[in-house]
Amino acid sequence: MSKSAIVIGAGIAGLAASIRLAIKGYQVNVFEANAFPGGKLSEIEIKGYRFDAGPSLFTLPEQVEELFQLAGKDPKEHFDYIKLPVACHYFWEDGAQVKAYADINRFADEVETKLGEPADHVRKSLKRSAFIYESLAPLFMHRSLHQLKTWTNKDALKSYLKLGKLGIFSTMYKANARQFKQAKMVQLFNRYATYNGSNPYETPATLNIIPHLEFNIGAFFPKKGMHDITLSLYKLALELGVIFKFNSKVEEIIVANQKAIGVKVKGQDHLTDIVVNNMDMVNAYKTILKEEKQPKLLLNQPKSSSALIFYWGIKKVFPELDLHNILFSEDYKAEFDHIFHKKRIYEDPTVYINITSVYKPDDAPEGCMNWFTMINVPNNQGQNWDSMINEARKNIIAKINRTLNTDIEPLIEVEDILEPRTIESRTSSANGALYGNSSNNMYAAFLRHANYSSNIKNLYFCGGSVHPGGGIPLCLLSAKIMTEMVSKEKDPK
């Protein structure tokens, strides 16, 4: 007997969910409000410049490769990438610079030479990061936190014995301040809180798990750009028989007798065996599940930060810049206070510049670069964004000019902008928050929606707004956790 599934949203988790379900024998239909797949992981082309529109950091590539392997295909024949020799190039206004080499010993020596931080401090910090990862990843990343068996398996029992060493009861900032003596090194490692839109002065030190991914495992770059993750998985889904219906906004999840039985699109009912929601959880409950019981505790949680991105075509090559570049604020704490408490943009923001043309030259005309220029900003609370964006643009340009000793504005020949309001309208992310609920307290991991509905049978969830969280690897893992739940419930053998 054939089985059917409907996936709402063709974001990266929706693509992964459709692939996994198709491999399990489901006939899958994906309904996407936009005219293209990928959600945030899309691209922009302007007058000879190509930009990856959204996530720019690629870690844990095996999560992408696994999808091809499950389909019986060689990943290298469909999706290829390289390991970066330098994960990021860091700049401060006083002229200090640090290259985060993939070779940990070289990075440690670089830090000692450039910043005066003992090399051994770096090695010890990354060993702690690996310890946190090895202790918590099997529990928090690869399993549902909303099932009893997660907390009674051997991985969980091992973690209980290490609680005092995992940073649960401290903040990221305090942990880093104990590990490093130089303020610049504390700032560099505090930056990893932004990987899920959090505040390093409030988020638990368990988030020091993130450097392990970037250093001990590695940062990578798809040879055809980040958007190739979307395109390759979309093509794989099509080959597996998944049907995509674009420009098809779901109006309602149809529920009968506390069971999801389909969706309504353009006034028409589409019935199915299971429904998978890849739409932002908050907006889903406000719109397509508005008649159902609302998880108010989860819906009312503080949201993560958002982003202001300027896509700039720069008619000059800056040889000192790499794929990933950070120009640090002079007062990091003030910057995060503005983002999370004042709901404003700090006058001296930390500027992130991603330049894919460094590794993919055809992303910009000859002698030019494509700058994905981003700062962290508050999510949308009804601020005067037009005024804030104009002011931020001036401050970003001033910051770049001071740090790189240049005059960047005359070099900008094309520009596009993505900001919290357009992030929300294009991707249905509540308040334009990039990662759903924030992780600014020790209970945050437990305050994400489960990968299933506890009230509505046959309704499942995946994506960055539910467990295990935002970012490409976690979104892919959310689809994996969800599909394993479907398999056990529908085929308990």
Image (cartoon, grey):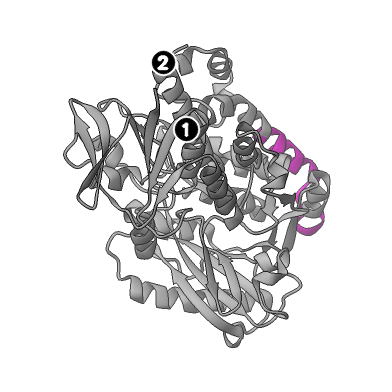
**Viewer-nearest residue: 358 or 169:** 358
Q: Which residue is denoted by mark 1 in the rendering?
A: 21
Q: Is 491 situated left or right of 165 in this image?
A: left
Residue bearing mark 2: 148
Compared to residue 71, the image places residue 185 above or below, namely below
Mark yes or no: residue 333 visible: yes
Quarter location, residue 392: bottom left
Residues shaded magenta: 113-129
Q: Which badge, 2 or 1, comes first in the chain's sequence?
A: 1
Number of disc labels? 2
Q: Which quadrant holds residue 131?
A: top right
Can you give x and y, in whole percent of width and height, for residue 205 in the image?
Answer: 54, 37
Tell me the residue at 32%/54% (across/down).
248
Q: Main secondary structure of the magenta part?
A: helix
User: Where residue 2 sits: x, y (%)?
Assistant: 40, 27
Q: Amino acid at mark 2?
A: Leu
Tell me where residue 18 appears, x and y as whole percent: 47, 39
